[in-house]
Image (cartoon, grey):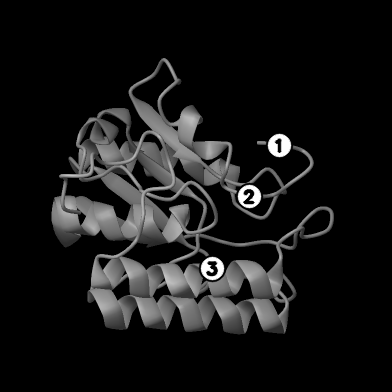
Amino acid sequence: MSQEKDTAEPTEPALLWPPGEIIVTLDADCTYPGEEVPGLVRKLVEEDLKFITCDRLRRAEEGAMSGLHGFGNWGLSVTARMLFWYGIHDSQSGMWVFWKDIMENKKMRPTHDGMPLSEEMKINARRCYGRKKAIEVSVPYRVRVGDAEINTWGDGWLNFRFLFAKRLGINRTRSDWGPDENTQV
């Protein structure tokens, strides 16, 4: 992850590089509980899951997210649930645990490598693997170490527009490693 920007841009190549079979993502700002990773990996393996996303909203510490960001996350998550009926509570969480080989499924590969990557990974996982293999687990969410570098209005609007474009099937591939043009996601 770039130290200059707190965005999803460096994520896409990293999804293809790790030597292991399981990939875990989380922000490096101490907000996500790294100590939960062994239990989440165990859950992925023992329950024969494909993808776990972590809901940070239900167990967030007081002050972990500003009121504006909390409202924005709520609005984006509700919009995603209404558009995709996929049942994910926290559409913007950056903490995921999944098998590396799911990225070989072209329908799983995201079309966007910016801020919408997070919500698209969850949408694609539920579409490809269903609610029993792509689950959401609540985890604690803590007060950030350092300042948030998110562009509140710009990133929020980009995510909101992306959800509608994805629902209507008019989102454009902005990532070289996304689906082929003929692949319906």
| Circle 2: element type | loop
Residue drawn at the location 54% of the way across and 57% of the way down: 115
Tally the marks: 3
Instruction: Estimate how packed mark 3 is, as few (under 14), some (14 to 19) or many (20 or more) residues with alpha carbons within 10 Å.
Output: few
Q: Position of residue 153 (x, y in %)?
A: 67, 75
Q: Is residue 55 above or below residue 161?
A: above
Are circles 1 and 2 on residues that touch, CB within 8 Å?
yes
Q: CA gap, disc 3 to disc 2?
A: 13 Å
Are circles 3 and 1 on residues that touch, CB within 8 Å?
no
Q: Which residue is mark 2?
A: 7
In terms of sequence position, does the residue under pointer 3 or pointer 2 come before the other?
2
Q: Is residue 172 above or below residue 82?
A: above
Note whether residue 86 is visible.
no
Q: Name the quadrant of the N terminus.
A: top right
Q: Position of residue 47 (x, y in %)?
A: 20, 44
Amino acid of disc 3 = Leu
| Circle 3: element type | helix
Based on the displayed image, in which of its 4 quarters is residue 72 positioned?
bottom right
Which one is in front, 124 or 35?
124
Amino acid of disc 1 = Ser
Marks 3, 1: nearer the viewer:
3
Amino acid of disc 2 = Thr
Residue drawn at the location 35% of the way across and 69% of the way down: 165
Which one is in front, 70 or 45?
70
In terms of sequence position, does the residue under pointer 3 or pointer 1 come before the other?
1
Q: Name the quadrant of the C terminus.
A: bottom left
Instruction: Estimate how packed mark 2 is, as few (under 14), some (14 to 19) or many (20 or more) residues with alpha carbons within 10 Å.
Output: many
Q: Which residue is mark 1?
A: 2
Q: CA gap, disc 1 to disc 2?
A: 8 Å
Q: Which residue is mark 3?
A: 158
